[in-house]
Amino acid sequence: MAKKIHVYNITVSTGEQFKNVRIEGSISSRYSGITTDFIPVENEDGQTVELTKYQIVKAELINIEE
């Protein structure tokens, strides 16, 4: 069975937004627990940024790709 890619728009506590963040599986199941504190996302300039899960204020699911 193929993995589903979830696409999110993420807003962090500073107000900065990361659009079209692609994550394999849902963000809640992938980054739950205390062992995964950092989430790598790509900003609009194509740079990878490491967010902590505690910075995320809102993660809006915009699409699920098969």
Image: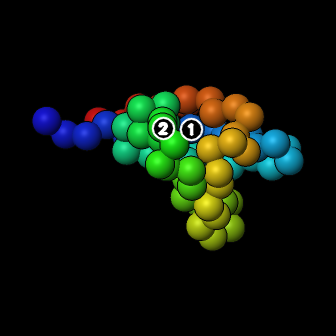
Q: Picture coordinates of residue 21 (x, y %)?
A: 55, 48
| Residue underneath mark 1 | 8
Q: Residue at x 68, y 67 (%)?
A: 45
Q: Secondary structure at mark 2?
A: loop
Q: Residue at x 55, y 29 (%)?
A: 61
Counting residues from the start of the chain, the first of labels 2 and 1 encountered is 1
Residue, far right: 14
Viewport quadrant of the N terminus: top left
Mark 2 is surrounded, within 10 Å at the Cα level, by few (under 14), some (14 to 19) or many (20 or more) other residues, namely few
Placement of 18 over or under 11, stated as above or below: below
Placement of 64 over or under 41, stated as above or below: above
The numbered disc on residue 31 is none
Question: Is residue 62 among the parts visible in the rendering?
Answer: yes
Q: Picture coordinates of residue 44 (x, y %)?
A: 68, 60
Q: Picture coordinates of residue 42 (x, y %)?
A: 59, 60
Viewport quadrant of the C terminus: top left
Mark 1 is surrounded, within 10 Å at the Cα level, by few (under 14), some (14 to 19) or many (20 or more) other residues, namely many
Q: Secondary structure at mark 1?
A: strand
Color style of the picture: rainbow
**Are the residues at dot 2 and dot 1 in contact (C-beta closer than 8 Å)?**
no
30 horizontally vs 9: left or right = left
Question: Is residue 6 among the parts visible in the rendering?
Answer: no
Q: Amino acid at mark 1?
A: Tyr
Q: Residue at x 63, y 70 (%)?
A: 47
